């Protein structure tokens, strides 16, 4: 495989990763804007998350008396694993060397690694809220991760590959065909994505009540650049799930070669898809209320069952031919 | 030349193991013998064992030895082949590490009431027993070695025998080990019935009827499963591991369970003729149940070593799932994928040996320094024991199947095996395999939650007890041992292609199906089937993680000057404005597991007791709160309690013939005599 390594491809892959990282706050800002419109509020400008990050990066870091070295390194590890995950997901171009580093299962593993350190950081200072957040996050994660893997299995069995590029390739090759396994997997991935990225109704990123927090409770003790990295990693994770939903199920338009024209088209189309997805997400968040924490397992069980049904329907109905 | 070298090494391995035993007999009088002779010899035995394993795997040395011991018509046969070599290597690594760990660890027993001689003597015997089990090539030698291993480990479990609970745990262990041994013996009996011989060579060519083959399979599954800890035969594990000294727990959990897996693999892939897919289904069911059951029970325990013991049950389940995949594919004419399943199983055997031994050695260090078994009394240990904390973290990351550590590689290979299900003909199997994969995914995610809980509660936060507040870092020998295993965990995670190549020698000799595709693309890329299907590059992921750490380091260096001027400000954590956070306000291990208790509440039998004393002046202000949670293993209720009751009743019936009158006993003798005469005539 070494002979396939092309310097240009690697450079482009890194550029795409950078684009991913840089564009992530914009997606969050867009969702917030649509939500504000729906609630008849004036929305902050789309550049607001960037300004927040800049402000946080320039602020002084404060540490709790009880914080250990793990607390200080965790933001870098969480951000780092999320960036590696972003490098693996095809954004606007399909054939990238980075996609070979890790397949979809490794992608889930990388999210798991980030979550592991996030939860440990929550437990590190030794406050009630940190532990509460960590415990809840691990519960949600433990139930969402198998569901996510089932979605991947349903897709991977269809494409006979777990490599994200190959999966998208086979989706493109099939053309527009409504298969039951894809429909179930799509719904399951939406639910998993909502749970994993801490959106309403599982978690509320805008909450100010410590008792109801999940993600925010774990990063309650962070300040300055450490907080900025944690926030940015969360935004990046949301973006990755958004891109996964768009590119796995509606891949049309993604650039299969590296010429500028097709890249431009791919970028434009992906933006449109993400804008629509973000609007749908915002509308959905406006329609439902945050659920009690102990209802979340039911929510995730639905996701898991949907994904399982998707996979079984592939195995039973579609693979026999 | 190579053969004679191997022979010398095997002799050195056994002699130094036995020598370690013999020297330890002096340890009661001269305690330094244990430190300066017994453990170094044990380490030597481990290194020799590792060397033999390496020779068998890398150079393909196979040799058969016949020793003039045993019965006149049946000498002891021993044989070294790649499968034996692989397991010898695992035994070797862990034994060598324990040999380094032991001298510092056993210091705490010097002033105690327990015999140091017994500890050293039985440790040596235990290791030699395991090495001989793996090398044995006839049923007789196998059973003798198996019993040496079981009985020696019984004495080690019962080592701190002044406490009744420990004696009880050891008895339970011995009982189950013996029942298991009987089942294995019966299984060998079936083979020897069909081959008229007791050597494994004869077993290999024996042709069993399908019915007898299935019976042999069942006996082997139950017999070896009892030793390995398959649910519901696992109950001795969570009792025996917590009471044994920690380095013995590491040997038992890391190695002895693997020896049982070795026996099962030998039986299944070497002796039993054509594999049947029904066996695959049985293995998949047993493995799935074991894995989920183990991890759910691990999640609610508060005793550190009990958590690890139940997690061993879970990992044995994962290994049996891999074996089940392998059998299913092999029986359905998909040999390459079947081999992949076996490779995943062996990879997980190696991984579990490494990280579980590491975690038990960590637990030994933690328990020695914090004088606590209970997670609820630990906390904040990372500040007091930074190195142990680091190594424990590596162990937790590995066991939680997170990239780029070793546990992830075997899980990934298992998923890749499962994803080839569309290749199968049978619709039922095509549906069952993905469901098992889903269960495996759930297990992995729950294991991560379990080890976040263990690490977060014991090492992070603020100390919850007096001892934890005053813990100190352990001695150098213990740190070196932990560090070696942690390094191996990282290494086997980082270079999966090399490990797969090594294991490939085993599967090649066992199934004669080379696995070339997995490692074709160099050390950087692991591609189990084809690069288009799936590829994983652990080194590049590690590079990414290291770059994240490097970024932190750069920021740290960059800000060094400004930090000198005004050091990083330390403040009190957020307390909602009420002030006065105490360590008791932290989340506890029980609280952490509470959401899981809600979600999976039917798994356990939980007994909760909550007593609340209210303030006499203010009825809403609790003065004193006591919460007790007891977790009962359901297997006791469903299986062991009825069986125990039945055995008691049966013995009560039999006891009725014990009347105490000499006339009756004379009558019994007379009747027996007559029956025997009638039988003979």
Image (cartoon, coloured by chain):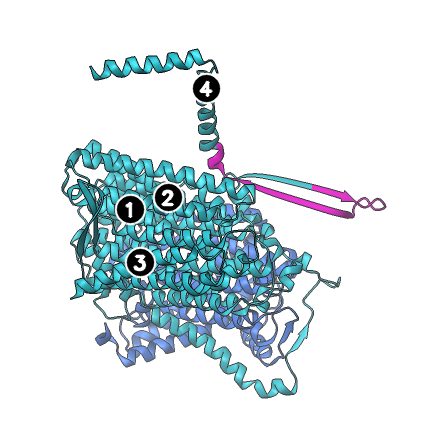
Chain colours: A blue, B cyan
Mark 3 or mark 4, whichever is nearer to me: 3
Residues at discs 1 and 4 both on one chain: yes
Quarter holding residue A221: bottom right
Which tag, 2 or 1, sits closer to the chain's start? 2
Q: Which residue is mark 3?
A: B15
Label 3: how many Cα within 10 Å (few below 14, some 14–19, many 20+): some
Q: Chain of mark 3?
A: B
Query: Which chain does the residue under circle 2 lie in?
Result: B
Q: Are marks 2 and 1 in contact (CB under 8 Å)?
A: yes
**Disc 3 to disc 4: CB gap under 8 Å:** no
Whether labels 4 and 2 belong to a single chain: the reply is yes
- Region of the chain picked out in magenta, as a range: B611-637
In terms of sequence position, does the residue under pointer 4 or pointer 2 come before the other? 2
| Disc with the residue nearer the chain's start (1 vs 4) | 1
Vertical comparison of B73 with B489: above or below: above
Q: Can residue A248 be seen?
A: yes
Q: Is residue A144 above or below residue B402?
A: above
Observer-side mark, 4 or 2, equals 4
Instruction: Measure the alpha-carbon separation of dots 1 and 4.
Output: 38 Å
Q: Nearer the viewer, mark 3 or mark 2?
A: 3
Q: Can residue B625 be found in the magenta stretch?
A: yes
Chain letter of the residue carrying label 1: B
Q: In percent of the image, x 50 and y 52: which residue is there?
A: B115
Q: Which residue is mark 2?
A: B227
Element at label 4: helix
**Co-location on one chain, circles 3 and 2:** yes
Q: Secondary structure at mark 3?
A: helix
The residue pinned by badge 1 equals B263
| Residue located 24% across and 13% down the image | B678
Q: In what quadrant of the picture does the C terminus of chain B appear?
A: top left
């Amino acid at each position: 495989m070494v002979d396939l390594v092309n310097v240009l491809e690697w450079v482009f892959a890194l550029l795409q990763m950078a684009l991913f990282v840089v564009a992530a706050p914009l997606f969050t800002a867009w969702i917030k804007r649509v939500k504000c419109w729906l609630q008849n509020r004036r929305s902050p400008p789309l550049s607001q998350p960037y300004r927040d990050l800049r402000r946080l990066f320039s602020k002084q870091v404060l540490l709790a008396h009880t914080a250990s070295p793990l607390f200080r390194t965790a933001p870098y590890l969480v951000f780092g694993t999320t960036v590696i995950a972003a490098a693996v997901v095809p954004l606007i171009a399909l054939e990238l060397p980075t996609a070979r580093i890790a397949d979809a299962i490794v992608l889930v593993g990388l999210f798991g690694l980030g979550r592991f350190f996030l939860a440990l950081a929550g437990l590190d200072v030794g406050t009630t809220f940190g532990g509460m957040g960590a415990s809840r996050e691990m519960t949600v994660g433990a139930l969402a991760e198998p569901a996510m893997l089932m979605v991947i299995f349903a897709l991977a069995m269809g494409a006979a590959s777990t490599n994200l590029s190959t999966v998208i390739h086979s989706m493109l090759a099939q053309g527009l065909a409504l298969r039951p396994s894809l429909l179930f997997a799509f719904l399951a991935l939406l639910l998993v994505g909502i749970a994993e990225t801490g959106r309403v109704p599982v978690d509320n990123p805008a909450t100010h009540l410590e008792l109801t927090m999940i993600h925010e409770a774990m990063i309650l003790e962070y300040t300055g650049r450490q907080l900025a990295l944690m926030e940015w990693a969360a935004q990046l994770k949301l973006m990755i799930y958004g891109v996964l939903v768009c590119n796995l199920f509606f891949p049309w338009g993604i650039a299969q070669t590296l010429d500028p024209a097709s890249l431009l088209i791919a970028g434009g189309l992906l933006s449109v898809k993400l804008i629509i997805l973000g609007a749908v997400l915002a509308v959905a968040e406006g329609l439902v209320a945050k659920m009690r924490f102990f209802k979340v397992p039911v929510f995730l069980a639905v996701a898991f069952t949907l994904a399982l049904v998707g996979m079984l329907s592939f195995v039973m109905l579609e693979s026999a031919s | 030349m190579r053969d004679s070298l191997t022979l010398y090494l095997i002799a050195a391995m056994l002699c130094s193991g036995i020598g370690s035993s013999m020297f330890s007999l002096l340890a009661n009088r001269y305690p330094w013998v244990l430190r300066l002779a017994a453990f170094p010899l044990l380490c030597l035995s481990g290194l020799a064992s590792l060397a033999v394993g390496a020779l068998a795997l890398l150079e393909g040395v196979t040799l058969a030895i016949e020793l003039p011991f045993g019965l006149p018509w049946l000498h002891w046969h021993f044989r070294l082949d790649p499968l034996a070599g692989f397991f010898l290597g695992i035994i070797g690594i862990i034994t060598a590490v324990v040999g380094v760990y032991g001298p510092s660890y056993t210091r705490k027993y010097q002033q105690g009431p327990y015999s140091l001689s017994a500890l050293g003597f039985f440790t040596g015997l235990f290791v030699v027993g395991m090495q001989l089990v793996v090398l044995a090539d006839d049923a007789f030698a196998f059973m003798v070695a198996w019993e040496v291993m079981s009985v020696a480990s019984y004495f080690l479990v019962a080592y701190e025998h002044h406490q009744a609970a420990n004696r009880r745990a050891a008895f339970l262990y011995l009982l189950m080990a013996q029942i298991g041994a009987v089942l294995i013996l019966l299984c060998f009996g079936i083979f020897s019935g069909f081959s008229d011989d007791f050597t494994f060579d004869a077993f290999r060519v024996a042709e069993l009827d399908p019915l007898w083959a299935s019976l042999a399979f069942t006996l082997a599954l139950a017999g070896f499963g009892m030793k390995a800890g398959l649910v519901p035969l696992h109950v001795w594990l969570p009792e025996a591991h917590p009471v044994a000294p920690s380095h013995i727990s590491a040997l038992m959990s890391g190695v002895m369970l693997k020896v049982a897996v070795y026996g099962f693999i030998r039986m299944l892939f070497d002796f039993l003729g054509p594999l049947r897919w029904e066996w695959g289904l049985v293995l998949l069911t047993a493995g799935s149940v074991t894995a989920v059951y183990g991890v759910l029970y691990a999640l609610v325990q508060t005793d550190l070593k009990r958590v690890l013991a139940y997690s061993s049950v879970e990992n044995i389940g994962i290994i049996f799932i891999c074996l089940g995949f392998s059998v299913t594919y092999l029986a359905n004419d998909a040999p390459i994928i079947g081999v992949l399943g076996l490779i995943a199983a062996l990879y997980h055997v190696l991984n579990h040996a490494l990280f579980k031994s590491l975690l038990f050695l960590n637990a030994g260090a933690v328990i020695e320094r914090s004088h606590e078994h209970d997670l609820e009394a630990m906390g904040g240990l990372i500040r007091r024991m930074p190195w142990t904390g680091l190594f424990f973290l590596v162990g937790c990351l590995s066991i939680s199947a997170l990239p780029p550590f070793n546990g992830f590689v075997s899980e990934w290979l298992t998923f890749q095996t499962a994803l080839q299900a569309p290749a199968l003909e049978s619709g039922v199997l095509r549906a069952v395999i993905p469901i098992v994969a889903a269960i495996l995914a759930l297990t992995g995610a729950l294991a991560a939650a379990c080890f976040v809980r263990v690490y977060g509660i014991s090492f992070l936060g603020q100390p919850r007890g007096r001892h934890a507040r005053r813990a100190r870092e352990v001695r150098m020998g213990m740190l070196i041992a932990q560090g070696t295993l942690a390094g191996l965990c990282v290494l086997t995670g980082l270079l999966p292609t090399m490990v797969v190549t090594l294991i490939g020698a085993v599967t090649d000799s066992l199934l004669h199906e080379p696995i070339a595709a997995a490692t074709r693309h160099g050390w950087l890329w692991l591609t189990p089937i084809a690069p288009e299907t799936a590829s994983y590059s652990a080194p590049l992921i590690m590079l990414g993680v290291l770059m994240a750490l490097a970024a932190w380091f750069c920021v740290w260096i960059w800000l060094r000057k400004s930090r000198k001027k005004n050091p990083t400000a330390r403040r009190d954590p957020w307390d909602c404005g009420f002030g006065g956070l105490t360590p008791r306000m932290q989340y506890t291990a029980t609280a952490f597991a509470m959401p899981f208790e809600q979600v999976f509440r039917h798994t356990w039998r939980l007994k909760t007791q909550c007593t609340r004393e209210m303030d006499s002046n203010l009825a809403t202000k609790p003065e004193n709160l006591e919460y007790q949670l007891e977790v009962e293993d359901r297997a006791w209720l469903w299986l062991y309690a009825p069986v125990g009751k039945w055995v008691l009743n049966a013995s009560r019936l039999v006891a009725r013939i014990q009347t105490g009158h000499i006339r009756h006993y004379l009558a019994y003798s007379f009747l027996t005599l007559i029956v025997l005469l009638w039988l003979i005539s």
